[in-house]
Image (cartoon, rainbow, N blue to C red):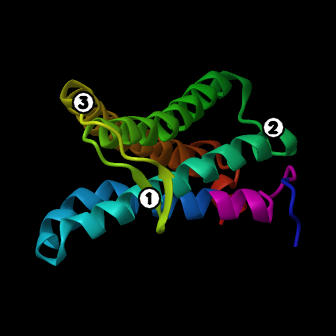
Amino acid sequence: MNWLDTEHRYGLVSRALHWSMAVLVLVMLASDLWMEALEHLGKASLMDLHKSIGMLLLALLAFRLVWRWYNRGRPLPPAHWRLAAHLGHLALYALLLFIPVSGVLAAWGSGHGIDVFGLSLVPAGPEIEWLEEAFEETHEVLANLLWLAIGGHVLAAFAHQFLLADRTLKRMA
């Protein structure tokens, strides 16, 4: 069991971060559907869960960025693909940062605080309607862009597997 990335395989930490964040992101993106479907159970509790998972993702992103800086053993794509790979990862990381930030600002503008799994992280404040509206819209647009970035990420993984034949999917599995 190797914790660090090598030229031949991603390490345990990188794989755990990648797949746990992937699952949580998909849950969050689908949450719009399940929150509407389960609205009769009490939307407040579902929204609290949504906010908690969002903050967990933000914390995992921070750890992932530190880990990426520390753990430099991962294989690099071919030189002519490197710019696309860097831009794709930058887009994913930026969206994973700004989506929860916009959600926090929307919640704060609505006069609600942010509780993370029952612990108060951001206290409630006064309602600021323009802030809530602006950042709810921003939150939704960024989430839609994340779907596109994920699609590009999946296509790139298949390109690695079938065009470059560099075993990237096997190294990440």
Q: CA distance from mark 2 to mark 1?
A: 30 Å
* Residue 167, x across and y down, in percent: 69, 55
- In the displayed structure image, the side of residue 93 where residue 24 appears, left or right: left
Tell me if residue 21 comes above or below residue 127 in the rendering: below
Q: Amino acid at mark 3?
A: Ile
- Looking at marks 2 and 1 on the same chain, the residue that comes earlier in the sequence is marked by 2
Q: Is residue 22 among the parts visible in the rendering?
A: yes
Between marks 3 and 2 in the image, the one whose residue lies nearer the viewer: 3
Task: Determine the secondary structure under disc 2.
Answer: helix
Q: Are marks 3 and 2 in contact (CB under 8 Å)?
A: no
Residue 128, numbered label: 3
Residue ID for mark 1 = 115
Quick one: 16 or 140, which is closer to the camera? Answer: 140
| Residue in view at x 80 percent, y 60 percent | 11
Residue bounds of the magenta highlight? 6-17
Residue at x 50% of width, y 41% of height: 96
Mark positioned earlier in the residue sequence (3 or 1): 1
The image quarter containing residue 41 is bottom left
Residue type at mark 1 is: Asp
Nearest the viewer among 107 and 154 is 107
Side of 16 relative to 42 (left or right): right
* Rendering coords of residue 119 (x, y %): 51, 63
The residue under label 2 is which amino acid type? Trp
Cα distance between the residues tagged 3 and 1 = 19 Å
Q: Position of residue 54 (x, y in %)?
A: 45, 53
Q: Earlier in the sequence, mark 3 or mark 2?
A: 2
Any mark on residue 69, and which?
Answer: 2
Q: Nearer the viewer, residue 49 or 168?
A: 49
Helix, strand or loop under label 1: strand
Mark 3 vs mark 2, CA separation in Å = 38 Å
